[in-house]
Amino acid sequence: MTKYRGEAGRAPNLDPAPVFFPTEEEFQDTLKYIEKIRPLVEPYGICRVVPPKSWRPPCSLKDNAGETVRFSTRVQKIHKLQVREPTTSSHGKKSRPKVSKILTFTPQAAQQQEFFGFEPGPSFTIKEFEAYADELKEKYFQAGEEGDTSRLDPSVEQIEREFWRIVERPSEQIEARLLRLCYHLCLTPDFQVLYGADIETNVFKSGFPKLATVANKQATPYETSGWNLNNIARLKGSVLEFEADEISGVVVPWLYVGMCFSSFCWHVEDHHLYSVNYMHWGSPKIWYGVPGFAASKLEAAMKKRLPALFKEQPDLLHKLVTQLSPSILAEEGVPVYKVVQNTGEFVITFPRAYHAGFNCGFNCAEAVNVAPVNWLPHGQSAVETYKEQHRKTSISHDKLLLASVKQELAEVSASVTHRQILASALKARLNLESSRRAAVNDLRAQTMDVNFDSSAERECCVCSYDLHLSAAACQCSPDLYSCLDHVKSFCSCTPEKKLILYRHELSELEEFLRELEGRPLPPLKFKIHGPRPELNRQLVDPSSGLESSRSWEAACGEVLNPAPGKGLMVVEPRSGGGPRVARVIRPSKAFSPNIELVRTGRLVLKPGWHTKHAILPAGFRTRVQFYDYLDLPQACYYMSEILDCADGKPLFKVSMEGRPHEKIVCSSIDFCWQSVQEKVNSRIKQLRESGKANLPPLRPPESLKGLEMFGFTVPSVVKVRSLALLSFSLTWRGNSLFQAVETLDPRHSCVEYWMERKTNDLWS
């Protein structure tokens, strides 16, 4: 029986990845520093960051928790990580279970999937595991023959050579006597080690201090540090700051408690995110990294060298159970770089950078993901790849992208670089969405409910694609949805039964893009059906005399309030300069539309974004039914929105739902809806001339007030109070009551509005 033979193995001959030593000043801004080193690291995919000597955070895992709290382990058969027979070869031919379109599995199917993996191991406290790991390492690297108690303290290089000897040449008999000295789990000739991996810190404990929840307790610098892994994922400037869920391993760190030879196999981070790993204490951890641009090369090399395993499991790389020596990858032309991480050091992996490695002895590390804005194109590439592979997602990429865009547009002093990256990412996503919607433009479409995915992520029942931006539904399956690419394949129903749901019209996404790019608004174009003879009419108060008349163009942006009981006088010029004939249009009885709040929007504390009458949130959106000027006397839904213009002033938009090209955008909240009434009037006159009956009455455009039609005079849109006070009927569509506009300004920053509100006591 052989023993440890360090000289028999070969250590990969690799160039080191870059190492950085930030100054205390550079270390203050985490994401800024990562952005600074990014051009230097991307060619390697991985780097090591050594904090300033003054940065030594206390580790809470070394207190009583290390002696009492237990964690689970995994059993790793190191000698089978690279060289092993496919399951079909060792157990006879098996067929993979068929996966249904809604991705459900039966117990029978689960039993058929007997692929190689890591089995559950015993649980330990940190103190127990440290003692176990130290004993295993000491026994394995015993210097002499059996019975010789002399010890060998192996170097990192010796451990590395021995690790790859076990992985690459498992046919050699592995030292078994140490296994008989350890736990009953290891009483086999297989070389097994244990790894405490993916330990949830919200269940176990983080090694970093967390912000105190005790009132009036001042936070320490380590509790608020951007390098504290409890904080880094949601730092300002990280796209993950908009992730509301506590996703373990993504925004909530995982702990890793390792022993000698315990390994993490080749993989990329979910959604190709950045990862940040910190070593709290213990023996070194050896990392191997491949830059993101060479990811496809690594995948091809592994499939070439391990064809039988990939034939059996095409998604083998997603399972994190397979190693391939960096020496072999280098022979295949894959650039591989090496990092040796020590206590108190960070290792950062970059988007789509494959990485693997192992531990040189007992250690305790912690890791989490982060997503600077420059990650967005990598994230988009990841979700499109997942779509092709029918792989589930961990986060909603579209939700994070749109939240980042809206936040950037709300910033008073926005970063030019961030805007450029966001504009590029949004443009790419808009192009994809445009082509996909064009392919289903024969189906009915309507705006998605604001709470469509608020309680749970919605995904395509065919390919698992995220449905935050758009989805397809069918009457046959009320609880199932598909992406736009699979709308015609997820069921066999006729198109009449299917419906497209979208969160934003393409025109709205285009407005976001225009604002990000800083392009000026295009000239306003109003498509008027038929002649528009009333354009040159003049509107006057009949008691004021013709001398005080004002042209339509001058009055279109104002609110005209005739005296009670009076009508508006429409003065029609006569051809040939003859006398003008005046007729009075009496106001119709009170108009009470049903205003539906779709989105509250965000508060903008800039001039023009609030008046004494209303707070005007950017992104505010309501829905109302009104006459369809393209199909009178039918009604249709109109969307009223407030957009954030590039010059920092609000723009008001009214558009037809399902017909986004029928829109009016201008700087006057009144003019939008007055123009709609103009179009309705024009169409009524055309139809009357053709002899059509049962048409709605003509109404003066000024009878529609912008604040009213947008919903700013509806108490329950502005502030939630007793429904008895409502002068309009409001349909909530599942909106939470806290979505009223006034809740956006809890500090009463819109002083003019709040003073007027207090004076008038509108809600008493």
Image (tube, helix red, strand yellow):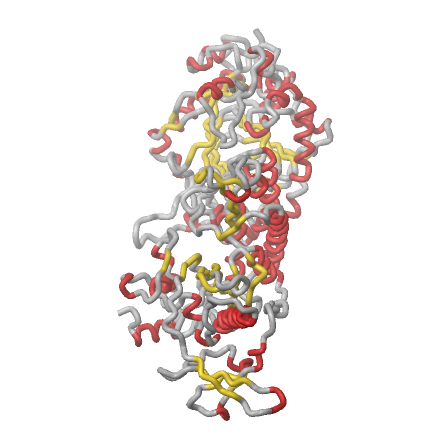
Q: Residue at x 40, y 77 (%)?
A: 587
**Residue 415 in view (yes/no):** no
Percent of width and height locating residue 492? 54, 35
Asked if one can make out residue 664 in the rendered structure from this viewpoint, the answer is yes
Q: Measured along the vertical axis of the image, is residue 557 above or below residue 469? A: below
Q: Give the farthest residue toward the front.
A: 691
Q: Position of residue 453 (x, y in %)?
A: 45, 45
Instruction: Specify whether 343 is left or right of 715.
Output: right
- At horizontal 55% and vertical 63% (from top left) the residue drawn is 630
User: Which of 727/118 is in front?
Assistant: 727
Which residue shows up at 33% across the image and 29% down it? 68
Image quadrant where residue 385 sits: top right
Foreground pick, 244 / 298: 244
Task: State whether residue 467 is above or below residue 148.
Answer: below
**Relative to 741, residue 474 above or below:** above
Q: Residue at x 61, y 26 (%)?
A: 314
Instruction: Give x and y (percent) for residue 280.
Output: 47, 36
Quadrant the N terminus occupies: top right
